């Protein structure tokens, strides 16, 4: 069975546990052709107006700011990208790989005489929510099982789609129709957080954090005999691209300080900076330890700066401070394997006072192998509960009091207004180091009024 993981930070296609395709869902919409994945990422800063990184999150027929010959709206880009995935499965892009273009906003695009499902003309194909039976599901109103079982265009293949919980019922219906046109027959949908968490023991109540391109998806899960989705929230500004942009600004400041050159001033040097940051992040960045060096070539000169990895981690910690505010005291936070590999993320979340753990690297593959038949059985559905792998032992609660101040060189600063860039929460007794200075978190009792 084939698994499609719908995460625009890394759109993944797996067959028999083996990755066939793993690239970001980014598109370059050119005048005559569209590029996707790493090919588009490597020119995104050179051609920002032609770059689109929202199409997979939006999954609708809204028009593109800069349409091309092959694509006029977000759904067209999804279709073209799925065609590329089908080609990796051995399918054909067909004689007309381009999605039909509508020259007017209200026109109905056509392909080989078939009315395309993302025009809104087949509203009944959108799944309808159901709560009965073993699964909380979205069910197709049309004969979906017959549609996915054969007669797929472009030498098609059947698969199961693991999707973020933030997708709506309408978006799942749009995805179903587009995938079928691209030769990919979806036999079942499963919430990706539920699937990953079902691979092994997890806390009885926990939250799973999964980073996408421009946002993060935070899913509340309840675990017992089953892992059940209890809630979903999107956190804007906490996606992979947002993290890279924050790091790029930090490095640009260091370039200006050390070399009086701003790499963000020109598209070519901005692309060089972004490429090196992306590659460093994808490699795991030596676990977020040591220094990170960047070299920029411009005007016949090469400029180089070096920043401590902990400075990048502090930048990341500041960005995710809003996450800590969304979780209750003592919440157990799990981080999806791909997200956990982002340099400094796990240690940064720990600095925010969060009880954090990561899932095994093969959690998605292991859970899919175990549950794929269950997900594909019966009516086409969005599965939001699966048999679990047991309940993990709850960690002992930290009995230390909350810190109120940070102590440095015999001087105490209020933690919520400290000059060291520390988060506003922490436990008394924790020791940290910032720029060679030893810091200690303490609790200062308020003075009693006389």
Image (cartoon, rainbow, N blue to C red):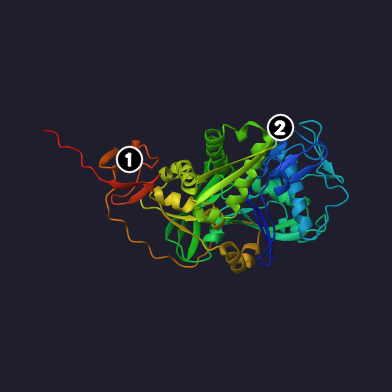
Please state which of residues 326 and 143 is positioned toward the viewer in this rendering.
326
Of 37 and 381, the residue lying toward us? 37
Q: Nearer the viewer, mark 2 or mark 1?
A: 1
Task: Locate residue 146 relative to residue 354 in the image: left or right.
Answer: right
As rendered, which of 388 and 432 lies closer to the eye? 432
Q: Secondary structure at mark 2?
A: loop
Q: Which mark is residue 415?
A: 1
Quadrant of the drawing holding the N terminus:
bottom right
Q: Residues within 10 Å of mark 1 (few under 14, many from 20)?
A: many
Q: Is residue 338 left or right of residue 313?
A: right
Give x and y (percent) for residue 155. Answer: 82, 58
For residue 337, above or below residue 233: below
Foreground pick, 182 / 432: 432
User: Which of the 4 image quarters holds residue 262?
Assistant: top right
What secondary structure is marked by label 1? helix
**Mark 2, residue position:** 65
The residue at 76%/31% (across/down) is 105
Q: Is residue 229 above or below residue 43?
A: below
Q: Residue at x 49, y 63 (%)?
A: 226
Q: Does residue 107 appear in this view?
A: yes
Residue at figure coordinates x 59%, y 69% from the top left: 370
Q: Position of residue 194 (x, y in %)?
A: 54, 58
The residues bearing labels 2 and 1 have C-alpha atoms spaced at a distance of 44 Å
């Amino acid at each position: 069975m084939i698994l499609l993981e719908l995460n625009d930070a890394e759109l993944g296609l797996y067959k028999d546990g083996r990755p066939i395709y793993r690239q970001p869902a980014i598109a370059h919409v050119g005048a005559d052709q569209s590029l996707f994945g790493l090919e588009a990422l490597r020119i995104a800063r050179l051609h920002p107006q032609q770059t689109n990184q929202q199409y997979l999150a939006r999954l609708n027929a809204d028009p593109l700011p800069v349409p091309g010959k092959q694509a006029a709206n977000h759904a067209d880009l999804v279709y073209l990208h799925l065609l590329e995935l089908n080609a990796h499965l051995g399918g054909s892009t067909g004689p007309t790989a381009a999605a039909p273009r509508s020259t007017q906003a209200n026109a109905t695009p056509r392909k080989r005489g078939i009315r395309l499902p993302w025009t809104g003309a087949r509203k009944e194909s959108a799944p309808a929510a159901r709560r009965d039976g073993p699964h909380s599901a979205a069910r197709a109103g049309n004969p979906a099982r017959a549609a996915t079982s054969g007669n797929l265009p472009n030498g098609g293949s059947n698969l199961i789609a693991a999707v973020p919980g933030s997708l709506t019922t309408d978006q799942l219906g749009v995805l179903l129709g587009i995938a079928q046109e691209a030769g990919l027959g979806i036999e079942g949908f499963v919430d990706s957080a539920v699937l990953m968490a079902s691979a092994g023991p997890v806390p009885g109540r926990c939250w799973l954090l999964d980073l996408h391109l421009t946002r993060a998806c935070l899913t509340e899960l309840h675990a017992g005999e089953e892992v059940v989705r209890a809630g979903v929230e999107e956190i804007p500004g906490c996606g992979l691209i947002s993290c890279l942009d924050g790091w790029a600004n930090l490095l640009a400041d260091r370039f200006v300080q050390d070399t009086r050159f701003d790499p963000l001033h020109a598209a070519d040097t901005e692309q060089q900076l972004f490429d090196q940051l992306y590659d460093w992040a994808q490699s795991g960045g030596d676990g977020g330890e040591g220094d990170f060096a960047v070299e920029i070539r411009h005007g016949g000169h090469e400029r180089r700066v070096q920043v401590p990895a902990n400075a990048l981690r502090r930048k990341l910690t500041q960005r995710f401070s809003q996450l800590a505010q969304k979780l209750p005291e003592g919440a157990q936070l799990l981080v999806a394997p791909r997200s956990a590999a982002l340099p400094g993320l796990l240690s940064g979340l720990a600095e925010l006072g969060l009880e954090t753990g990561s899932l095994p690297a093969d959690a998605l593959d292991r859970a899919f192998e175990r549950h794929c038949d269950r997900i594909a059985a019966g009516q086409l559905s969005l599965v939001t509960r699966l048999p679990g792998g047991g309940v993990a032992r709850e960690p002992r609660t930290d009995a230390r009091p909350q810190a109120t101040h940070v102590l440095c060189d015999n001087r105490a600063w209020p933690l919520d207004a400290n000059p060291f860039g520390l988060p506003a929460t922490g436990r008394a007794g924790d020791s940290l180091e910032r720029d060679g200075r030893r810091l200690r978190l303490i609790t200062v009792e308020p003075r009693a009024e006389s």
